Amino acid sequence: MIMRAFEASVEETFNAWLDPRVMHRWLFVTAISEIVEIDLCPHTGGAFTITAMAGDRSIDHRGRFDLVVKPRHLAFTLDGEPPVTVDLSPREAGCELTLEQPGSSLDRWGAMLDRLAALLRR
């Protein structure tokens, strides 16, 4: 489990998970890759594909939204991996995000959440 405080509101942080204009700046972005296309249906049961380019190699991240409860809860399955859950709760200054993905290394999520926190910093 990862817990992270964000300076942004619950709504702003939640929307960063579902707005392609924001997602392409932090989700699945690394020092050697960038997002080139996002296709998503951001509702319970909706599918998504996020295409990244790393050099001349294309990487598709495919999955489905298992549950979308705006603006506090998001659950999705990615590329056959264990389910990911994201929960948001308000704090006095911003919000707290809790991310869980049982049986999986959370290192990559930690790096992505660092990018999201920097993006949402006021």
Image (spheres, rainbow, N blue to C red):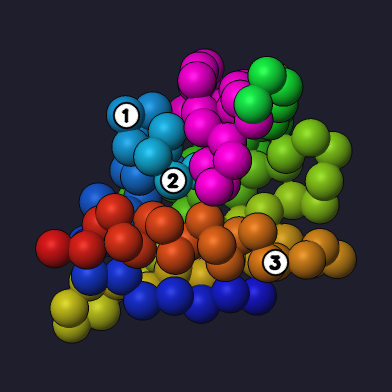
**Residue at 68% over, 19% down:** 56
Instruction: Sort mark 3 into few (<14), some (14-19) or many (20+) by Cα contacts within 10 Å.
Output: some
Q: Earlier in the sequence, mark 1 or mark 3?
A: 1
Q: 18 above or below 92?
A: above
Q: Secondary structure at mark 3?
A: loop
Q: Which residues are magenta?
A: 28-54
Q: 66 above or below 89?
A: above
Quadrant where the image shows the N terminus = bottom right
Residue carrying label 3: 106
Q: Is residue 42 visible?
A: yes
Q: Is residue 47 visible?
A: no
Instruction: Sort mark 1 into few (<14), some (14-19) or many (20+) by Cα contacts within 10 Å.
Output: few
Residue carrying label 1: 21
**Residue 51 x, y percent position in the rendering:** 60, 23
Q: Looking at the image, which is closer to me, 42 or 19?
A: 19
**Residue at 36% over, 76% down:** 5
